[in-house]
Image (tube, grey):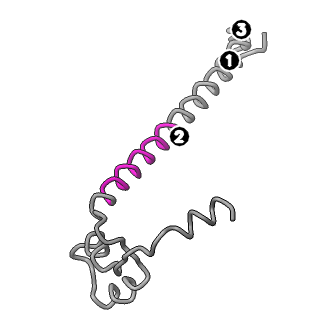
Amino acid sequence: MNEAASVVSTEGPKETCNGEIFLMCVLGKYAKSDDMDDLSDFIECEQGKNQSSWLRERQRFRIWKYKKTIISKVEEKENVLESSKRVVNQDVAEYTYDADAGSYRHS
């Protein structure tokens, strides 16, 4: 018997309950009893686990991940903008204004 099979076989069944309490935490005053009855059958919650604490930590993680993504996108846009400004400035530097002709010419 391999390690994974032995670990699985030694675990006892976990006590679970339906997710009605979990849905009440998530949905709050927007919970409808018709929808909750159907949906709570598909959600299993471990008894004794603090669901509201888990939700708060999960929300903190989502916010952190969102901010990290936004910051990286902003930095990437700034880098693209900086590089495009450099290219434009180099192109402009190659042209000089000829007052006699009244136009720009390539140097």
**In the rendering, at what x and y percent does residue 19 appear?**
34, 78
Q: Which residues lie in the magenta part?
A: 55-72
Using the rendered view, name the quadrant where residue 32 is placed: bottom left
**In the rendering, at what x and y percent does residue 35 appear?**
35, 87
- Work out whether 3 lies above or below 103: below
Using the rendered view, name the quadrant where residue 82 is placed: top right
- Work out whether 64 lies above or below 82: below
User: Mark 1 or 3 closer to N-term?
Assistant: 1
Give the number of the mark in front: 1 or 2.
2
**What main secondary structure does the magenta stretch of the protein show?**
helix
- Say which amino acid is labelled 2: Lys
Q: Kindly identify which numbered label has been placed on residue 92.
A: 1
- Element under disc 3: loop
Q: Kindly identify which numbered label has been placed on residue 100.
A: 3
User: Mark 3 or 2 closer to N-term?
Assistant: 2
Tell me if residue 40 is in the magenta stretch: no
Residue drawn at point x = 56 percent, y = 70 percent: 9
Residue furthest toward the right? Answer: 107
- Element under disc 1: helix
Q: Can you identify the residue that label 2 sits on?
A: 73
Side of 78 where 33 appears, left or right: left
Instruction: From the viewer's side, name the closer residue of 84 and 97.
Output: 84
Side of 42 where 49 appears, left or right: left
- Say which amino acid is labelled 1: Val
Q: Quadrant of the N terminus?
A: bottom right
